[in-house]
Amino acid sequence: MVSTDLENWLPPPETHAELDWAPLLTLDLSRFDTPGGKESLAAELRDAATSWGFWTVINSGIPQALVDHHFAIANKFFNQSIDEKKKVVTDYEGGGSHLGYRVPRVMEVGGEHGGKKHQVVENVEMLSIPKIPALDQEIAEPLHDVINKHRNDIAEFQKLCYEKVIRRLLVLIAIILELPEDYFIERHDFCAPSEDHIRMACQPPWHGNLGIRTQL
């Protein structure tokens, strides 16, 4: 069930800038259940993993309206005040949870050969949401109010991501490694306790030197 209290998400227009790009392989998952489909996809995935390290997938079967809805949830979260977003934060440095909102980090760059060092504020925000195995099921990890309000939508989306994408990729990886097709599926059951999560990311428009500090 998709909630309706969100602003519609409109994808940004495709850039016309001349940018460096890599010809990443695209796996068409609609071929998965066709005769010989898994085997040919496994061969393509092997090439992508050994040649590039990255790939994309299309035709997963997840409705586009549901994908757009989750972009709308992400927009609603990231458009909140920083104080609201920091109510549930990650704790990488303290050895705690990797779930929650990751505050943009300040990174030190430069300084080579006696030059100036610059502290640059990372231009990306992230929110890692724990797996919600079933609708209305309680989980131990805290959630932001916005995320908790839409938790059933998120639970539905997480399950679809597993069934339509992750599960199929686990089968393809097993084929590549010449293992039984269900080898990894049996070891990565969706309902089993795990640190599986879904991550939302936001990269605001970059404004020149905004957020850069110089350290001599």
Image (spheres, rainbow, N blue to C red):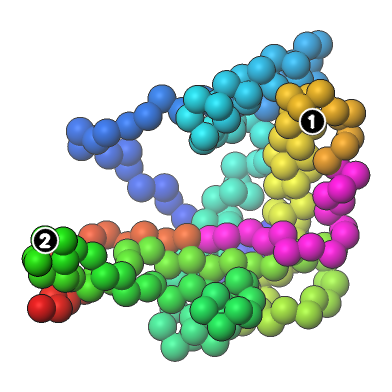
Q: Secondary structure at mark 1?
A: helix
Q: Quadrant of the C terminus?
A: bottom left
* Image-based side of 60 in relation to 16, left or right: right
Any magenta on residue 188?
yes
Looking at the picture, tell me which residue is in the foreground, 21 or 4.
Answer: 21
Q: Which residues are magenta?
A: 185-200
Residue 116 drawn at (x, y percent): 10, 69
Q: Quadrant of residue 206?
A: bottom left
* Residue drawn at point x = 32 percent, y = 38 percent: 14
Any magenta on residue 77?
no
Residue 39 drawn at (x, y percent): 75, 16
Q: Residues within 10 Å of mark 2 (few under 14, many from 20)?
A: few
The residue that mark 1 highlights is 174
Looking at the picture, tell me which residue is in the foreground, 15 or 19.
Answer: 19
Q: Secondary structure at mark 2?
A: helix
Residue 22: which disc? none
Residue 113: which disc? 2
Residue 186 drawn at (x, y percent): 90, 44
Q: Is residue 49 visible?
A: yes
Under mark 2, the amino acid is His
Give the label, 2 or 1, closer to the camera: 2
Residue 96 drawn at (x, y percent): 63, 80
Whole-number angstrom distance, CA of label 2 to CA of label 1: 48 Å
Q: Quadrant of the N terminus?
A: bottom right
* Residue drawn at point x = 73 percent, y = 24 percent: 176
Q: Residues within 10 Å of mark 1 (few under 14, many from 20)?
A: some
* Image-based side of 213 in relation to 172, left or right: left
Q: Is residue 179 above or below residue 11?
A: above
